[in-house]
C-alpha cells in the first residue's frame, strides 16, 4: 500500500546565474536561509519530505529536517541536472502516492499550498500550482508516472513528462508559487515580498 505524496526539495544545483561568494540557497532570508525556510514549509505540511542536496548544504540543515530525509549527491551526480535530482528523490520515496517537486529557492511557497496541490493529485496525474492563472511550483506527479520519473536527467527537469500528460493547474492564493531566485535582484524581490507579508499580519 502506497503512502501519502512526498515532497522532493531539489537543492543540488550550482546556482551559477546568481554569482557571488555565497550560493543563493545559503543566503539569509526571513531569519533563516533560503533553503532552510523552503524546507521548513515542506516539513510543516507533515507530508513525507526528502531534500536532495550536496554535502556542505546538508550539514547546514541540522535541526531543520531529519538527517534520514536528506539525500546527499556527489558533485558528479549534482552536475547531471535537475532531472537527476528529481529521479533521486522519487527513488528515495518510491512507496509514495506521488511526488511534489519543490525547488529549494522558493521559500515563500506556503504549507497550505503544498497540501492543496497534494490533494489535487488524487484526481490528476500531473498538477502544478498556479496563481491568478500563471503557472508556478510545486509541480506534482502521480505514482503511475514512477517509471518515467526515475529516468529523468539533465537540466530540463521533468519537462518531457509534462509534455506527455495532461496537467491540471491548481489555483492557489499564494504568489510565492511564482517567485524563485536566479539573480540577486530576484532575492531582493522575495525579501520585499516577505517583509510586506509580515507587515500584513
Image: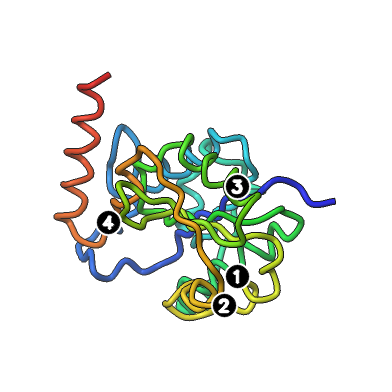
Q: Quadrant of residue 94?
A: bottom right
- x, y (%) of residue 85? 53, 68
- x, y (%) of residue 201? 27, 19
Q: Earlier in the sequence, mark 3 or mark 1?
A: 3
3D distance between C-alphas at marks 4 and 3: 21 Å
| Residue of label 2 | 152
The structure residue drawn at horizontal position 46% and vertical position 40%, both measured from the top left corner, is: 113
Discs 2, 3 touching: Cβ within 8 Å: no
Q: Nearer the viewer, residue 192 or 12?
A: 192
3D distance between C-alphas at marks 2 and 3: 19 Å
- How is the rendered protein coloured? rainbow
- x, y (%) of residue 81? 46, 75
Residue 56 tag number = none
Look at discs 2 and 3 and give the one toward the viewer.
Answer: 2
Q: Earlier in the sequence, mark 4 or mark 3?
A: 3
The structure residue drawn at horizontal position 31% and vertical position 32%, both measured from the top left corner, is: 31
Q: Residue furthest right?
A: 1
Q: Earlier in the sequence, mark 4 or mark 2?
A: 2
| Residue of label 4 | 181
Q: Height in image: 71 above or below 109?
A: below
SS at badge 4: loop
Discs 2, 1 touching: Cβ within 8 Å: yes
Indicate left or right for 107 with 49 as reference. Answer: left
| Residue of label 1 | 87
Few, some or many residues within 10 Å of mark 3 (<14, 14–19, 20+): many
SS at badge 1: helix
Q: Earlier in the sequence, mark 4 or mark 1?
A: 1
Amino acid at each position: 500500500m502506497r503512502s501519502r505524496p512526498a515532497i522532493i526539495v531539489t537543492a543540488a544545483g550550482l546556482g551559477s546565474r546568481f554569482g557571488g561568494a555565497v550560493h543563493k540557497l545559503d543566503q539569509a532570508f526571513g531569519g533563516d536561509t533560503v533553503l532552510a525556510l523552503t524546507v521548513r514549509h515542506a516539513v510543516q505540511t507533515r507530508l513525507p519530505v526528502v531534500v536532495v542536496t550536496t554535502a556542505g548544504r546538508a550539514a547546514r540543515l541540522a535541526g531543520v529536517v531529519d538527517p534520514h530525509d536528506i539525500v546527499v549527491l556527489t558533485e558528479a551526480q549534482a552536475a547531471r541536472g535537475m532531472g537527476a535530482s528529481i529521479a533521486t528523490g522519487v527513488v528515495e520515496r518510491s512507496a509514495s502516492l506521488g511526488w511534489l517537486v519543490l525547488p529549494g529557492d522558493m521559500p515563500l511557497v506556503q504549507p497550505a499550498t503544498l497540501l492543496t496541490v497534494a490533494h489535487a493529485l488524487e484526481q490528476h496525474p500531473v498538477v502544478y500550482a498556479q496563481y491568478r492563472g500563471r503557472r508556478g511550483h510545486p509541480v506534482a506527479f502521480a505514482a503511475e508516472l514512477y517509471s518515467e520519473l526515475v529516468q529523468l536527467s539533465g537540466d530540463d527537469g521533468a519537462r518531457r513528462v509534462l509534455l506527455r500528460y495532461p496537467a491540471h493547474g491548481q489555483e492557489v492564493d499564494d504568489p510565492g508559487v511564482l517567485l524563485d531566485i536566479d539573480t540577486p535582484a530576484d532575492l531582493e524581490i522575495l525579501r520585499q515580498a516577505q517583509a510586506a507579508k509580515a507587515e500584513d499580519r
